[in-house]
Amino acid sequence: MANKTVKYKTKIIGGQSVFHIGICDDEKGTCAQLEEWCCDFGEKNGFDIEIYVWYTGESLCDDISNYKIQLDMLFLDIELVSTDGIKVGKFIRDELENLEIAIVYISSKSSYAMNLFRVQPIDFLIKPIEKEKLMEVIICGIKLHERKNQVFEYCVRGYNYKVPYKDIVYFYSQDKKINIVLKNKEMQFNGKLKNIANVVPHNFILIHQSYLINLDFITECSYELVKMNNGALLKISQPYRKIVREKITQNVWGR
């Protein structure tokens, strides 16, 4: 890997979790400036930050696909010499099926808006980059990261457990018990589904007094049923059908 990629790694001691930032630009001066400002942000705000730098799109794609480097945010130059930033972004989204990395495009031009739509970047920075604007983008990326990594907490026989919301397919109630359904297993605890519905993220919705589903895991739907990606067919009860149809349209098919 070292022969293919010129890469630096910087860790700032501060917060409790590590935020991983990637920088890919063929201008070494831009990379150095962004790295310095990201380090400044970590030091001033108490975040642990690891920074990786690439000078070519090929080396970036090679590392994140073959060496499984995990990034939370990526500053990606559009006008790379060989493989341009748009192709790299599509590789991340389409080939790796990674929708988690918050991509921030950087460029000396502002004429790429429509080409970037498919990649779903969270922002677009024009060179020369302003430090204040960069700080705002990092804050936005960290907020998105924290939201994606929120966890549901519950207690069983005196033991506390945490489950990431992004892994939960749906909740269902049965005999005064709440079941959490993940892709490959279920957990159970005492509770009320309506109480859980008041604290879950916005992508969860009640479709029945007994079912609270994660909209991100729907694969098919009709007026009366939804099919989840684990194969489960769940009934939408009459009082919920209108709002469920609206939410599914907005959050799944519209997206």
Image: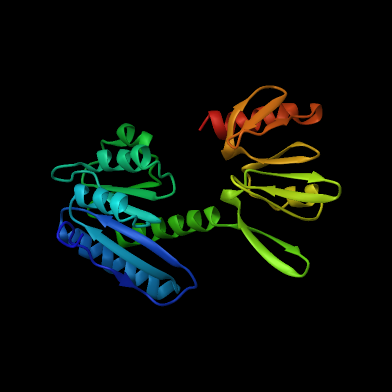
As drawn, 243 above or below 75: above
- Taking the spot 40% from the left edge, 45% from the top edge, the residue there is 98
Image x and y of residue 183, in percent: 59, 44
Which of the two residues, 156 or 38, is positioned nearer the viewer here? 156
Image x and y of residue 237, in percent: 79, 29
- Taking the spot 35% from the left edge, 67% from the top edge, the residue there is 50
Image x and y of residue 49, in percent: 38, 68
As drawn, 64 above or below 203: below
Residue 129 shows in the view: no
- Taking the spot 64% from the left edge, 33% from the top edge, the residue there is 247
Residue 218: name its quadrant.
Answer: top right
Q: Quadrant of the N terminus?
A: bottom left
Q: Residue furthest top?
A: 223
- Taking the spot 34% from the left edge, 58% from the top edge, the residue there is 134
Which of the two residues, 57 or 227, is positioned nearer the viewer here? 227
Task: Classify residue 48 as left or right of residue 240.
Answer: left
Q: Residue furthest front?
A: 184
Residue 242 shows in the view: yes
